[in-house]
Image (cartoon, helix red, strand yellow):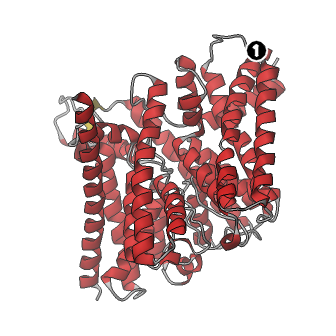
Amino acid sequence: MILKPHTQDLRIIAHFLGKITLGFGMMMALPIGLSLFFGERAPVADFSIGLLLSMCAGFLLIRLAHLPQNTEMRWMHGMVVASSAWIVCMFLGAVPMYLSGHWRSYLDACFESMSALATTGLVLVQDLDHLSHAANFWRHLMMFLGGQGIIVVALSFLVKGGPGAFRLYVGEARDEKILPNIVETAKFIWIVSLVYFVLGTALLAFCGIWAVGMPVAEAFFHGACNFMAGFDTGGFTPQSQNIIYYQSMSYEMISILIMIWGSINFNLHYAIWTGKRRELWRDIEIRTFFVTLTVVVLMTITGLAKGHVYGAPVEFMRRGVYQVISGHTGTGFQSIYAQQFVGEWGPLALMGVILAMGLGVSACSTTGGIKMLRIGLIATALKEDVKRFLTSESAVVTAKFRHLRDLFLDDKQVRSAALITIAYILLYLLGTAIGCFFGYPFLNALFESTSAAGNVGLSCGITGASMPAALKVTYIFQMWAGRLEFVSVLVLGGFIVSFVRGK
Amino acid sequence: MNRVKSVVNVITGIYFEALFALFIIAWAFLICLFIFAVYP
């Protein structure tokens, strides 16, 4: 028998959802300030409406919940709040974008909003080159917030620590604590991001001024936007031509640095920043990343070389390797046009990029996809099994791996890694099947579906305002489920079923 | 003193992470050179 949730459950969920909505709404003050700085009037109204709407929704939820202090939050509440907060923020974040008139429908604005929050980078915006600075900045800011995690933002500023905070944090697919206190963990994630924000923005801005020849204010605006999209492995850029716009190898190389920094586990950042630098070479995630990167670069570059697509190693680097690293880290910056993937690249190179996109890099980072920790664990388990067959039958074979400390491999870890890996593969295939249903070729549909579910954002041309609405909804679901890594999404599904059918 | 030590650690940490990213770029470029030598 399924038990119907109590009113108290709904009140707890509404209370925390209200707080997150308030926090998210307050962020809209930043684009309002920017539009005043650049003298843009219309965005002030758009974002004020969005801010007011978010504030009203947040206060209403908190008021309706009327929760007594020190109420205990259970795992179910944390998971439901985490997964539903992303949907609520998607709807609210889309409001000022839709009001700007640059999106054909509210669904398109919601698609872009989820793409930003989930750090995917697929775009449906119309005439991006003439979008206001405020709306453009908002797209990138949402990407930055989503990359850190909406819950991490709330934990840093609005929610008190405690077991409930940890349950919220885990619901957002971050099950590794960096510091014993979860609020301190959230604050450390912000410190890393802000330190790199200053460094990365300065690097890109100076490169923009010296190598690209941009005016100072524009160079810093582009630098800040591209940093947020690169470090949070999102892939938006402030203009329609993506990274091709800059026509600068140094700008591309700096963006690779930023993408790699963003794909490192925050725990590893902590270890390196506290003097344990050897951890970088010993960690299972980095070692696995090195192996998979070598494989996908080999595949892609061989495909490009055999097809005589580019004529020099530097071109392989700027086009081929750039796309592979952009895909592997889940960023989605494009140094070639979308149509070139299917028009020029050929199936082997395309398969290399699809594989890179599906894999992702580190857990507890801003990247999407299956993640290197899971691939590393499955590979270690396979190695252990083979070793067991090769040694004497009475021998006890154990496998160890290094992830911030020495750990013994156990069946529970392998099972969990295998289950999530299978779930990702099924999600990739679901979008592919729906893409094929709408008449797109298999490889194109697989490419776009993997890009959406792996929160990458590379596109081979399917994503556009004219694609079927059902496919847009499918990709929104894929981006959401892929970012939250399924568990909290499934718990929300179970919660809705128990609410409807429970007794 | 501890604060100075942690700031130094952060700076060397960032430097180390930058070296790591540069190493990845250099490794990928080596692969490009190798493939270009095989399929000129």
> Vertical placement of B15 versus A432: above or below?
above
Front in this rendered view, residue B19 or A334: B19
Q: Is residue A271 left or right of residue A502?
A: left
Q: Secondary structure at mark 1?
A: helix
Q: In terms of image quadrants, where is residue A373?
A: top left
Does residue A169 appear left or right of residue A206 in this picture?
right
Q: The C terminus of chain A lies in which quarter of the figure?
A: top right
Q: Is residue A111 visible?
A: yes
- Disc 1 packing (10 Å; few <14; some 14–19; many ≥20): few
The disc numbered 1 marks a residue on which chain? A
Kind of residue at disc 1: Gln
Q: Is residue A301 left or right of residue A399?
A: right
Q: Which residue is mark 1?
A: A8
Q: How far across and how far down the image is residue A325, in percent?
A: 41, 63
Identify the residue at image location x=78%, y=47%: A48
Tell me which residue sits at (57%, 32%) in the image: A171
Front in this rendered view, residue A280 or A136: A136
Q: Position of residue A212 (x, y in %)?
A: 45, 77
Res A300 seen here? no
> Image quarter for residue A328?
bottom left
Rendered view: A99 above or below A174: below
Does A373 sit above or below residue A398? below
